[in-house]
Amino acid sequence: MKWIGKIVLLCIFLNSCQSVNKKNFPKANYSIIPKPQFLSKSNGVFELNENTILSYDSTQEKNVLFFTNFIKNKYGILLQNNNPKSHKKNEISFRKLNTKLNHQQIHNITIESNTISISSTTKSGTFYAVQSLIQLIELNNSPKSKTLYIPNGIIKDWASFKHRGMLLDCCRHFFSVSTIKKYLKLMSYYKLNILHWHLTEDQGWRIAIDSYPKLTEIGAYRKDSSGIYGGYYTKEEIKEIVSFAKELHIDIIPEIELPGHSQAAIAAYPYLSCTNEKFEVANDWGVFKEIYCAGNDSVFIFLENVLNEVVELFPYKYIHIGGDEAPKYRWENCEKCQQIIKKNQLKDEHELQSYFIQRINNYLKSKNKSIIGWDEILEGGIAHNATVQSWRGINGGKQAVKNGNQAIMSPTSHAYFDYDIKTTDLKKVYAFNPIPDSLNEKEKKLIIGGECNVWTEHIPDENELDNKVFPRLLAMAEVLWTNDKNRQYNEFKSRINSHYPILSNKKVKYGIEVVPCKIEVNNDNAKINLIKADQDLTLKYKWLNTNNSYTYYNDSSLIDVKSDKLIVQAFKNNTNYGKPISQLFKNHLGLSANVSYLTSYNSNYKGNKELNLVDGKLGSKDFRDGCWQGFWGKDLKCTIDLKKIKPIKKIGARFYQYNNSWIFFPKEIHIESSADSITWKKWGTVNNKKSNRLRGKNIQSYELTNPKTIARYIKIHAKNLTTVPLWHEAAGSGAWLFCDEVIIE
Ligand code: ACM
Ligand code: ZN
C-alpha cells in the first residue's frame, strides 16, 4: 500500500473512533476518590495520544514529568513534554491559578474535547490535579489502550484538611523499602500527604543511629518462636524513602517513642531504665513497664543525641514523640525519679511524664521542630506548641483544641485499620467526622486533620497489610480531603467499585468492605437465616462434618440447626468475598424458648439479647464474637420457658474465663426445673472445676443430668465472683461472668 493510502485509511479509522467516542461516551466514569469538591460532567471526550501537546512553564516541570512518565510507563505513549507555547488543540496546559481563595492545594481542571487545562496556585495543587487526571484516565481506559479517552467536565478541588495521614508501624513487623514505596504511591494516588512512620517500639528499634550502634545491633532483633525476627532502615534507605515521598508531596513524620514503648532501646542500653537491669527486646505484644528513667540525665543526653540524628534525616516541622501507654510502676519505685518529682514539686508520676515530654519538647524547639504526641501527653500539662493526636476516642482532641493546641484525630472507633472489619467496616470509616460538632469555630480550626493507624502486631506481611488497609484507606482519604457533610455511603460505594480493578492492577490485595453475612436463628421456628450485608453478594454454606460441598443459599431458604459448625462463604462476581465465616451450633430442646432475666446483662456485651442463651449459637474463644453475654459484678439468674412440657435428661450452661480481662468462670451454678412454674425440682449445684487463676481464654460447660424429668420451666443461677480475686493486679474491681448458651437435652 502506498503512503497516501495508509494516511487516508488512518484518517477514516481515527474519524470513526472520534465520531463514536466524542459524541457519545456512554460509559464515562467520573468516580474520582477522594470525591472532588466540585465536579460538573459534560458530553464529549478529550483524546490523549502521542500527538497530544503539553504546554507549561518551567515551574511545572516536575508535575509534567510525573504525568508523562505515568503515560509512558503504563500505556507506552510518549508525550512531548517541553512546549511552552499554547496550541489550543489536542493540548494539555498547566497554568498558574489566580484566585483569592486560599484553600489547601486548590486546583481547577477543565476538560474539553480539544484541550485540558490544569491550574493551581501551588505545585502540590497541580500534583493533585494530575492525580485526578490520572484517575480519570485509569477509570475510563483499559491498560492496553493506545488512545486514552478522558470525559469532558470541570473540576474545582481543594483539601479540607492539611494533615491527611496514615501511621505505619514498622516495629511490630518490619516492612521493606519497596513496600513502603508502594504505600507512598498509593497514598498520594488518594491524596494523603503524611506518612506517620512508627520506628521505635518495645519489639524493635528500626532506625540506624550512628552514635548508638547497639540500638540496631541489639534493639532491632527479637527472639520469637520461629527464631530471630527483625530488621532496620539504614540512613541511606531512610533518605531514599524521604526523597521518594517528597516527589509524591508526602511528608514523613518519624515517631520516636518516649518515655514508654522503649524496651528495645533499654535492651540495647540498660542504663536507660530505672533499674539498669538487662532486658530482652520484647517478643510478645502488649504494654511493658520497662520505660526510660525520668530521673537520669544520661537518658536525656541519649535522647537528645538520637533526636539530633533523626532531625537530620527528616526535614519537616514535626517529630512524633509518642507519649502513650507509659506504665508508671518503675518511676514509682525509682529513687532518682522520685527525687525529680520532689525537686520540681511535681504532684505525681503523670506530672513527671509531663516534665519528661516538656524537656524533649524544649530540646526539639531549639532545633526548630514541633512535637506531636498521643493524647496521654495532655495528662499533667502540655506546652502550647505541642500537637495532640487523639486516639482514645475524640476527647483528647477536644480537650487539646479547647486548650489552644492543635489536634490530629485518629480515634480507635473509626481510624484503627488493624482492627477487624467486624468492628471497623468501610461504612464506619466513611462516617468518621474528625471535627466534633460541639466545638466552636476557633477550636474547629485547630483540628488539622486525621490519620488512619495501622499497628502491625497481627500484620506480618504486605498481603495482610493490603488486606487490612484497603479499601478502608479510600474512605479515610475521602473524609480527610473532601469532608463532605452530606456524604452518602451508597454513592461512595458505587465509586469504589470502579477502583477495585485499578487496585488489582497496582498489585494491591485489598480486603473486604464489610462482614458479608450475619448468621441468625429465628426465634419462632428455630431455623438459621443468613443475612447478606450487600445485594451484590451470593452466599453458599456447608456443615463441617456432614457435607463436603457448599449449598447455594437463596434469601428465602432457611437452614435447620445441627450440632456442628456451619461454614458460610460469600461470593462477589463469582469470586470468593472474604474468608469463610464459621459458626458453631448446638441443636437442643431449648431452641426458641423464652428467657426471662432476673439479673440484667451488660449493655456492652448483649450478645443476642433475650435470645442469646437459647439461640443454638456457641461462642468462640473471642469473647467479642457476639455470642457471649456479659454480666458485670453480678450473678446470672434467669428462667427459661420451653413453651411446652418436654422430657429432659441433661442441662448444661457454658461459661468463659479470660482473667486478663477480668472474666471468670462462675463459682457454681444451681439448676432447677418445673412443669408448672409453681413446684420446683432442685437438680443440684455444679461447682467450678477449673482454677480462676487459669490463664488464657477458656470455655467450660457446667452440666447436670437427671434422666427422669419432665419440665417446661428451667431456672439457672450462676454465681459471679463479683470482685476480682486478691492475687490479680486489678484486685477488687468488679468481675465479669460470660455465658453463651444454656443447653437442654
Ligand atoms: C496507641 O494506639 N497506643 C496510640
Ligand atoms: Zn527512674
Image: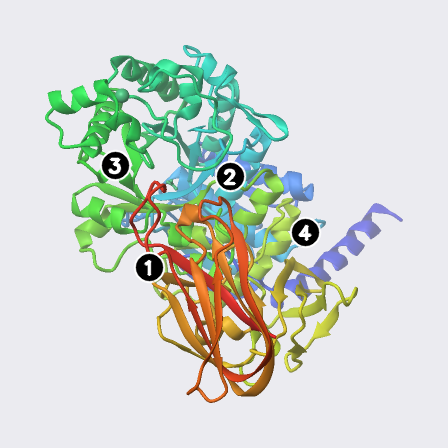
Give coordinates of residue 417: x percent, y percent: 47, 48
Question: If you read the primary sequence from the N terminus, does the residue marked by circle 3 or circle 1 appear first?
Answer: 3
Would you place residue 302 above or below residue 723 in this image?
A: above
Left or right of 448: which side holds 8?
A: right
Left or right of 367: which side holds 612?
A: right
Give coordinates of residue 348: x percent, y percent: 17, 32
Element carrying mark 4: loop
Asked whether 40 or 710 is in front, the reply is 710
Asked whether 719 or 622 is in front, the reply is 719
Q: In the image, which disc is placed on residue 147?
A: 4
Q: Residue at x 58, y 61 (%)?
A: 497
Question: If you read the primary sequence from the N terminus, does the residue marked by circle 2 or circle 1 appear first?
Answer: 2
Check contact, mark 3 vs mark 2: CB within 8 A: no
Element carrying mark 3: helix
Question: If you read the primary sequence from the N terminus, does the residue marked by circle 4 or circle 2 appear first?
Answer: 4
Element carrying mark 1: loop
Disc 1 marks which residue? 633
Disc 2 marks which residue? 457
Disc 3 marks which residue? 377
